[in-house]
Amino acid sequence: MDMIAFNHFVDQAEAKLDEVVVSGSDDELFIASYLHGHFSLAVSQVLQSDNICLNILNDVLLSNLNDAFANKELEQRDQHKVFTLWSDIKN
């Protein structure tokens, strides 16, 4: 994936997350905001690496989320919602 395609995906993902601010419920806003924070961190980590691609972004994001969830940052129900939202965004 070239840098232009990567940036395009990041822009589209952020637009989808921002869309929840306008049209989502309080619960959806919480989940989207939580994911957006982790997504932004993962993007910055990937941009600092030598291999900028969607698969690496996915791996980094999922690793970060799994670490956070192992520390019990969210209840299991909310963890599932975060994973579901990420799945919807990347597909």
Image (cartoon, grey):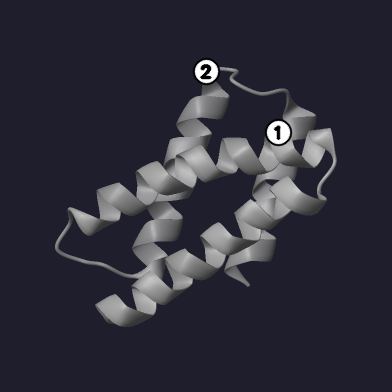
Nearest-to-viewer mark from 2 and 1: 1
Residue 80 in view here: no
Label drawn at residue 30 = 1
Query: Which amino acid type corresponds to the residue marked 1 in the rendered image?
Result: Phe
Say which residue appears at 50% left-offset and 27% top-offset: 68
The vertical placement of 63 against 18, above or below, is: above
Which of the pair 21/16 is nearer the observer? 21
Which of the pair 20/63 is nearer the observer? 20
Residue 39 location (% of width, % of height)? 47, 48
Say which residue appears at 66% left-offset and 44% top-offset: 32
How crowded pointer 2 is (Cα within 10 Å; few <14, some 14-19, many 20+) is rated as few
Residue at the outermost left position? 50
Residue 47 lies in quadrant: bottom left
Residue 77 in view here: yes
Label 2 secondary element: loop
Query: Closer to the N terminus: mark 2 or mark 1?
Result: 1
Residue 86 lies in quadrant: bottom right
Label drawn at residue 71 = 2
Residue 87 location (% of width, % of height)? 65, 60
Residue 1 location (% of width, % of height)? 32, 81
* Left or right for 34, reference 40: right
Which of the pair 66/35 is nearer the observer? 35
